[in-house]
Amino acid sequence: MEASIDPQLVPQMTGSNSTASGDGLYGVSSVYVAFSTVLAVTLAALSFLSKGSSKSTPLPWVNRPSTFDVLQMGAKYRFLMGAGDMVKKGFEDFSDSPGFRMVADAGEIVMLDPKFAAELKNDHRVDFVKLFLRDFHEGIPGFDFTQQGARDAKILREFDDTVEWAEKAAKGLPYDASAVQLLFSMAAMHTTTDLLTQVILDLAAHPEVIEPLRQEIDTVLREEGGWTKAALHKMKLLDSVLKECQRMKPAAISGLRGVLNADVTLSDGTRLEKNTSIAVSSHLHWDEATYENPQEWDGWRFYNLRQTPGKEHSSQLVSTSPEHMGFGIGTHACPGRFFGAHEVKVALCHFLLRYDWKLAEGVVPQTRTFMWSLVADPKAKVSIKRRCVYY
């Protein structure tokens, strides 16, 4: 079927003096679109360039976007694929600077030296909730649920289990109950799983510590008469091994992140403007001035440190410090680390007592780096067999 247009209607649609290629409806639309595009790009460029003029102390850049990378896509991609190396190089190149600027996954941030962790860890001006809302697109329709996770409720809410909560939240609408539970698991279990995976791989690479661990577990369980919190607390070598695994490969390259809700002046005079996104590096985990032979895995490291006066508590797995931010630090340190530590210890005890394992032939585990995260090698394989000992 062919369509035709009555010529008499054309003036009504385009104007009596217009032509298809002139300045009528189609011409005006093209000019309007072109003008709007140029204006939008210009405003975006001016907005980006204006970021340099602020009350903040000028800091060097490590991945500053090029002139034509107005949307910062190139800089963000470099961060996504090589953030760990980028941060390491930044502190090597700018060792005299308190930190540096970089474009991360959600925009520009200031990466600070770990020496500032102690003064910022409990500073109410460092707002993690604001960072959470920004990173999870709180202002975009469809992401409204992020506001629920950011509520600072003073009165305890009614529900204490996710099954009932999901049922009430659905308000009679159909939903996938299993998917809801999996989503909660992703939020609550991935770091625990990652730590347990890493310690299994590290013990496979360092089998010399496995037998001392088994002896400690057996001795403590006999002394305490079974599985108790006191028994887990007395397993100091087990605690040390887990903390060393977390030192060598923490869950992230930064242990403290947030958005400033006020202007902040650091102890060295560095000024940071309100709404600046900041992160504190975790690179003291591998610092020679902090740890002896930091690049070598030593399962006894924190066991020995606990024998040092004044370090009995700071050397425990659940303790946080600028030198070890595996669980974060300060106000926003992981609140579930105490439960998580017990959970991993119990699981590891059962593995050690019931199984032998080693790395599969030719396997050399490689830590995966993606954005902020350091992930235990998900493709590493181990050979495992059951022991003839039961507890």
Image: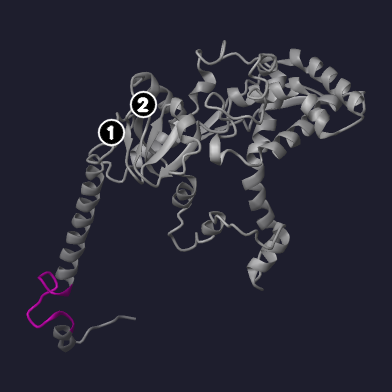
For the residues labelled 1 and 2, the Cα–Cα distance comes to 10 Å
Q: Which residue, as the protein is rendered here, is positioned at the far bottom?
A: 8
Instruction: Give the crowd class for mark 1: few <14, some 14-19, many >=20 residues within 10 Å.
Output: few
Q: Give percent across and percent down for residue 266.
A: 37, 32
Indicate the amino acid at tag 2. Pro
Q: Quadrant of the N terminus?
A: bottom left
For the rendered model, the colour scheme is: one colour
Residue 369 makes an appearance in the image: yes
- Is 19 magenta? The answer is yes
* Residue bearing mark 2: 98
Most foreground residue, 228 or 101: 228
- Is 278 magenta? The answer is no
Q: Quadrant of the C terminus?
A: top right
Question: What residue is shown at x 44% (from left), y 30% (from top)?
Answer: 82
Q: Secondary structure at mark 1?
A: loop
Does residue 123 lie above or below 326 as drawn? Answer: below
Q: Is residue 124 left or right of residue 189?
A: left
Q: Main secondary structure of the magenta part?
A: loop
Please report contact status of discs 1 and 2: CB closer than 8 Å, yes or no.
Answer: yes
Q: Quadrant of residue 259?
A: top left
* Residue bearing mark 1: 57
Question: What residue is shown at x 54% (from left), y 36% (from top)?
Answer: 330
Instruction: Give the crowd class for mark 2: few <14, some 14-19, many >=20 residues within 10 Å.
Output: many
- The boundaries of the magenta stretch are 13-25
Q: Earlier in the sequence, mark 1 or mark 2?
A: 1
